[in-house]
Image (cartoon, rainbow, N blue to C red):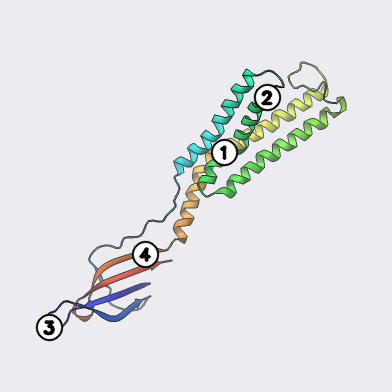
Amino acid sequence: VAIAAILAPTANGQAPAVDSRLVIRSGLQTPAPHFITPPQEVPTPNLKSEGKALWLSLGSTLLPMGAGALMLAASDDGTALGTAGALLMGSGLYFGPAVGYWYGDASGRGWKGVGIRFGTGLLTGLGVLAICGGDGGDNCNIFDSSDDASVAAASILMLAGIGVMAFSAVYDIAKVKSHVRESNDEKRRHAARLSVVPVVSPANGGTAGLVASVKF
């Protein structure tokens, strides 16, 4: 849709006055105006950086997990430092990969990954408790060298759960740039584009004017 306000020169050579006509072009067979300068589109606001989203997801995952691992290594069993380290590692694994999605306006996809990792961790924990429940959990230590069948089953289940959560985190980090790109493309498709340019129309002996163009 183009709306043109025509500046028509007066007969006595005075300064041109604004013609009262508004020309609305929408597929009509009218002479095409000659653009003195090409139309300039207003940049779509609030586009997000794909690279920044990647680094946010990567850093928010690796930094908490690394710090938590150091805290666990420096602590004794059952101390507050060890508990804080475990919580820090868990937060990095569960929520870290989603940070880039939250920044890049793809929060739905980010929360989906959080749900997959959290659900996997919950099911793994419940499964380990169910396997170890017969002994009250006293002898169910995956780091024990015992040949007890419950220890082996709990070990396999826990390693499988950790593997699924790790794969989900790596996958989300690897795909964050493509999802932010899709979000930016969606914004471009739905953003109105406005341009105002000077033109010389073939009608009325080369009338000068301005054409405002809005695309939806």
Q: Amino acid at mark 2?
A: Ala
Q: Which tag is nearer the camera, tag 3 or tag 4? A: 3
Is residue 35 left or right of 41 when viewed as pictured?
left
Determine whether the residue tagged by mark 3 lies in a helix, strand or loop.
loop
- Residue at 46% x, 44% y: name it: 50
Above-or-below relation of 34 to 49 = below
Q: Which mark is residue 12?
A: 3
Disc 1 packing (10 Å; few <14; some 14–19; many ≥20): many
Above-or-below relation of 204 to 80 = below
**Mark 2 or mark 4: whose residue is earlier in sequence:** 2
For disc 1, the marked residue is: 97
Above-or-below relation of 183 to 137 = below
**Mark 1 or mark 4: whose residue is earlier in sequence:** 1
CA gap, disc 3 to disc 2? Answer: 91 Å
Q: Which mark is residue 80?
A: 2
For disc 4, the marked residue is: 194
**Mark 3 or mark 4: whose residue is earlier in sequence:** 3
